[in-house]
Image (cartoon, rainbow, N blue to C red):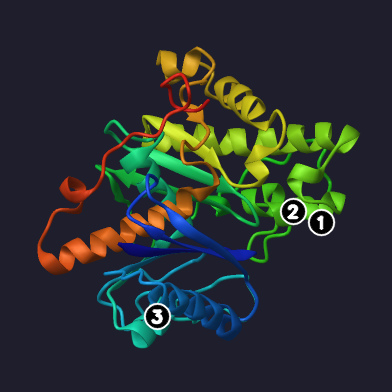
Amino acid sequence: MFVGIEGGGTTFVCGHGTGPHDLAGVHTIPTTTPDETLAAVGDWITACLADGIEPSAIGVASFGPLDLDPTSPTHGTITATPKPGWQGTDVPGHLRTRFGLPVAIDTDVNGAAVAEARWGSLRGGGPGVYLTVGTGVGGGVVVAGRPLRGLLHPEMGHLLVRRHPLDDAPGSCPFHGDCVEGLASGTALRARFGRDGVDVSGADLELARTLLGSYLGQVVAIVTLTMAPRRIVLGGGVAAMDGLLDEVRRVAVDLLAGAVPHPRITDGARDYVVRPALGGHAGLIGALALAADARASTSGRDPDTDATTDVVTDATGRHPT
């Protein structure tokens, strides 16, 4: 049994289990200050312990950027985040000190990518990419089921994209202004329309879909040309906007213009850019996977052979499209 925590810019979502088949106890906590939020997370874990839940490890899939260098003295801390007050917060250290359990941490999108590779839309081998569009924009890459890391971790939300001719709003990213996060995130939508992405309607919806389709389609094209993943999952609350997935596919296929002559793309990308099979809980389930990996590493087991391997599909047996 493991505890998973998905740390987002708006909410922290907690749950326990070993994967999508037994995820339980899901609880949402508003993201306020680090002290208040992590105290509430700790209180939830304490309540689980009182109810007889006995986790052997904790996994955290968190917004970032994060210091993921295991040799770094600040490993696991949140670094240059635009989230006020959270820079320098040591989320795993807080939990490790309070509960004395192994704690693993990775980015929320890396966690979601690992979960989709183990149980969902990225299963089947080969590199895969999970893009999330919510409060911010991010991307996680899995290769052989493991998250890709280098100097830091991928920051696809800061890719610089061409502005759409209809877009004259200032970008919301504090670092770059009009990178994809500054133009296509939930934060950018609220600044432009005064509403969250799923609440935009009428003429605003048509414009939002056109703009976001352009920016996210560019990201899909860039990722395709640089990483050649077998599949890209588009998740996050904003990505659920009516008609957006099809617009992203259309723009990406047009931009690639046959340069990647594979039928998965040239036939309209319906089996290439897909929804998460694990729905809105991909990040949380990924946190459970991170906890399982942490536990396995302390006991010398291979987490990939220990993991439950039920594949999550839709009612037809296909990956969600």
Badge 2 or badge 3: first in the primary sequence: 3
Q: Secondary structure at mark 1?
A: helix
- The amino acid type, in three-letter code, at marker 3 is Leu
- Name the residue tied to disc 2: 188
Q: What residue is at 75 percent from the left and 32 percent from the top?
A: 210
Give the class, few, some or many, for how many residues have Cα within 10 Å of label 1's Cα (few <14, many ≥20): some
Q: CA distance from mark 1 to mark 3?
A: 35 Å
Badge 1 or badge 3: first in the primary sequence: 3
Check the picture and name the quadrant holding the N terminus. Answer: bottom left
Residue 154 left/right relative to 144: right
Q: Secondary structure at mark 3?
A: helix
Marks 2 and 1 close (CB-CB < 8 Å): yes
Residue 191, disc: 1
Q: CA distance from mark 2 to mark 1?
A: 5 Å
Residue 97, disc: none
- Name the residue tied to disc 3: 95
